[in-house]
Image (tube, rainbow, N blue to C red):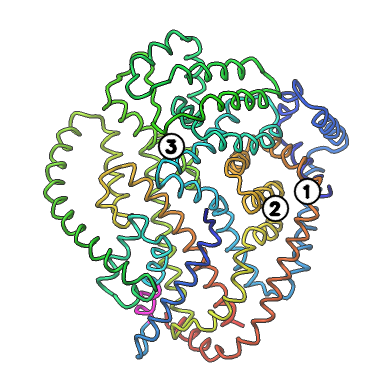
Amino acid sequence: MNRALPEMLNCMNAPGTFLAGNCTDMTVLERQRARMKWHLHEHNDPIQLHQQQQGYNFSGNELSGVFSVPIPAGQAQGFMGLVCGDSAVKPDPCSENRWAELGYGSCGLVVNNNGAAGFEEMINGRNNNSNISRTFSCPPTVAAEKKSNDAVLSQKISLPTGKESFKKRKADKVQSNKAVAAEDDSTEKRMKGCAEEGDSKITEQTSTKNNTNNDRESSGDTSKDNSKASEVQKPDYIHVRARRGQATDSHSLAERVRREKISERMKYLQDLVPGCNKITGKAGMLDEIINYVQSLQRQVEFLSMKLAAVNPRLDFNIDDLFAKEMFPACAANFPTIGMSSEMTNSAYVQFNPVQQMVSSCGLDMGINSSDLALRRTISAPVSIPETFLDTSCFTQAPPTAIWDADLQNLFNVEFQQGRTTPFQSQPFTGSIEASNLKMEM
Amino acid sequence: MRNSTSLKQEFLKKWIKGLQVCNSSSEKKMTIMERKKAIKMSADIAMASTRNGTTCWSRAVIANSTQSNRVVVERILGPHKPSRSVSMVMHKKILKKSRRVCSSRSRRVLMRKRDVAKTRSIAKRLVWKKTRVLKSLVPGGEFMEDEMCLIAETLDYIVSLRAQVDVMRCLATTTEFINGK
């Protein structure tokens, strides 16, 4: 709770439109929270808020400082660097998994699409709703969709990824059942039994349309479950639909599917490459990707150079020993270490619990799409209040636990380092050489 | 379901093994550039071997480094060596053949593409150029005709490069810390 406070304060800096926007449909919990925020707002002007925040930062700094005293500054910095890298890499688990699934075979694709579809749904549905429902609703939807893989497969391709699909869906709705039937006839060779699916889809669409508020999610789920019952026994063909005016011969259909897949992967790349999500257009994205790959390759070059300079004998035996002890702990705690030293970084404070959430999500539950959603909300500066809403509902329960884990991890590392220091008496001669080498360089 | 942590650990294990092999294979004192080369090579091979030959780029990396340094590759690839080496030979054969085919085909493709590019918009050409640059960056990318394949490989390559950079940075900082103390 203590940590949630500055979060709140922080969020007050964000435009008040957030309150105005969300006041229309809020649950009791949110309303309460909003009232609290108003209360705070009355008492503190922004500058004070800022100061308070800074003070908080400092305390955080001290806190982490207390525990990292035995670690020298250089090491701390090293960890910071490590952390920076890692914070950038944090999306790894999910993206990688997604990737791996994406890469090989259609089943992977299905699982993938689960995440995508869930996410898409989240985006589509509740523009004016709070984020809580999004994040909460996400795991169940994913689960539900995982259960109905076939259903998702067929649904998915009919709604190509992204927001525009929603519009398209709307357009489809306007075109109504007749169009659907006609389309089905035209592409019947490929997709038998499409009419059924189309019907169920339409019911789902209408249901999602009708329920404009919070309960939309649940009803969508139920309708999906209903449709699942009818769609479970579908064979594993790819379901492609052509809209009115689009070519229906097999070549162009295949081409369309291919293009959709490419754009989907491009989207994953966009998520993966930092600073790429603002760029539209394929050329710009490719540019960014090229730059990123080049920079990574250069980093590898540089690091190998550095290692060569530091280690005069190319002998990592000591490090091996040390790695065996240190790395499991260190590697396992990468994200959490990242958190704690990000505490010192004032810019990150406001996102801190969110990221912890992300990390814990990624580690414990491995829910890809919720992870993704959180990242999305983090990356967008406008959505700070939303993230706040996210965190505030979560931080009530787990923060102490997370903190404890954090500190424990820190202790762990420290302890490991303490243990490894006895082994470090040997390389001293080597270090002198290394410094000489450095001088030569 | 592999997360980045296990990937990093596997990479580190293999990398260190490769470094030891490098170290033991060369008795004389190496210069800094040689050391750098060895470190980079072993890191690359280790990174590629974590993929178990499921991706094109990792196979390309391994195939490229097999020419220069067979010992390290075989050591890092470890117990699966016999079957792997057979498949590697097959793969190389295919590669050679495809290279021949590619060279004859790519000329034709190039000609056709040039004609098309004249008529089409500049943006398309730009994308194509950039795709070519990307192909030159990703190992084994020259043989990826399909754009989808290229993008997928790029994704995987980026993920593993990141893991590599992370581990290397970690090791660099820790060794620096040890030596500087």
Q: Is residue A139 above or below residue A329?
A: above
| Residue A411 in the image: above or below residue A19 | below
Callouts 1 and 3 close, C-beta under 8 Å = no
Q: Is residue B38 magenta?
A: yes
Is B83 in the magenta? Answer: no
Q: Earlier in the sequence, mark 2 or mark 1?
A: 1
**Quick one: label 1, few (<14), some, or many (20+) residues within 10 Å?**
many
Q: Amino acid at mark 3?
A: Glu
Amino acid at dot 2? Ser
Q: Position of residue B54 (x, y in %)?
A: 37, 56
Check disc 1 and give the amino acid type.
Answer: Gln
SS state under label 1:
helix
Residue drawn at the location 43% of the way across and 68% of the way down? A302
What residue sits right under mark 2 in the picture?
A346
Residue at point 12% right, 40% down?
B111
- Mark 3, residues whose alpha carbon is within 10 Å: few (<14), some, or many (≥20)? some
Q: Which residue is mark 1?
A: A53
User: In this rendering, do the residues under marks 3 and 2 share a single chain?
Assistant: yes
Instruction: Assign a secondary structure to mark 2.
Output: helix
Residue A343 in the image: state x and y as whole percent. 71, 56
